[in-house]
Amino acid sequence: MANNNTPRSWKALISELIALILKSMNKRPRTWHQHVVPYKDDWAVRREGNKRITSKHRKQSTAINKAKTLARKHKADVIIHRADGTIRDRINYD
């Protein structure tokens, strides 16, 4: 009798695992788009979807250069924001 229960539990476990894998595959893939955003009294580069900043800079131009370097490396976009947070420009590196 014990042998009959073991295959069922393995089948259930494998089935559950496959369901979890399929569910996680349906998520939107992460992008490497870089946003240049106002940060306190400075400027920051932040990867799209992240809460944490990648780097902090005194001048917006320096932040833009850093974002461009990262975007070129990952074939992504640079989205430049104004001080009020609205989008000023978008540069594509596909």
Image: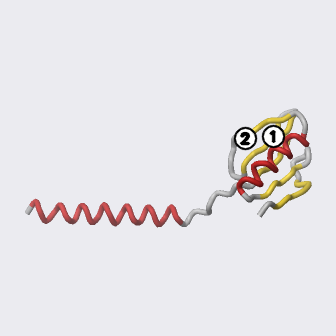
Asked if the residue at tag 1 contacts the one at tag 2, i.e. Cβ–Cβ closer than 8 Å, the answer is yes
What is the x, y in percent for residue 69? 79, 48
Res. 54 mark: 2
**Callout count:** 2
Q: Is residue 5 left or right of residue 69?
A: left
| Residue depicted at x 90% and y 56% | 89
Mark 2 neighbour density, 10 Å: few (under 14) some (14–19) many (20 or more): some
Element assignment for label 2: loop
Residue at point 75%, 45% (across, down) = 46
Residue depicted at x 55% and y 66%: 26
Observer-nearest residue: 57 or 24? 57
Q: Position of residue 18 (x, y in %)?
A: 39, 65
Q: Residues within 10 Å of mark 1 (few under 14, many from 20)?
A: many
Quarter of the image with the N terminus in it: bottom left
Residue occupied by mark 1: 44
User: Going 74% across and 59% down the picture, which residue do you hit?
Assistant: 75
Residue 45 horizontal side relative to residue 61, left or right: left
Dot 2 amino acid type? Thr
User: What's the residue type where badge 1 is placed?
Assistant: Ala
Work out whether residue 29 or residue 77 is closer to the camera in this orientation and state it.
77
**Quadrant (top left/top right/bottom left/bottom right) for the C terminus:** bottom right
Towards the viewer: 83 or 92: 92
The mark nearer the N terminus, 2 or 1, is: 1
Q: Is residue 70 above or below residue 22?
A: above
- Give the quadrant of residue 58: top right
61 lies above or below 86 = above
**Image coordinates for residue 72, horizontal then vertical, percent:** 77, 54
- In the image: residue 75, left or right of residue 60: left
The CA span between labels 2 and 1 is 7 Å
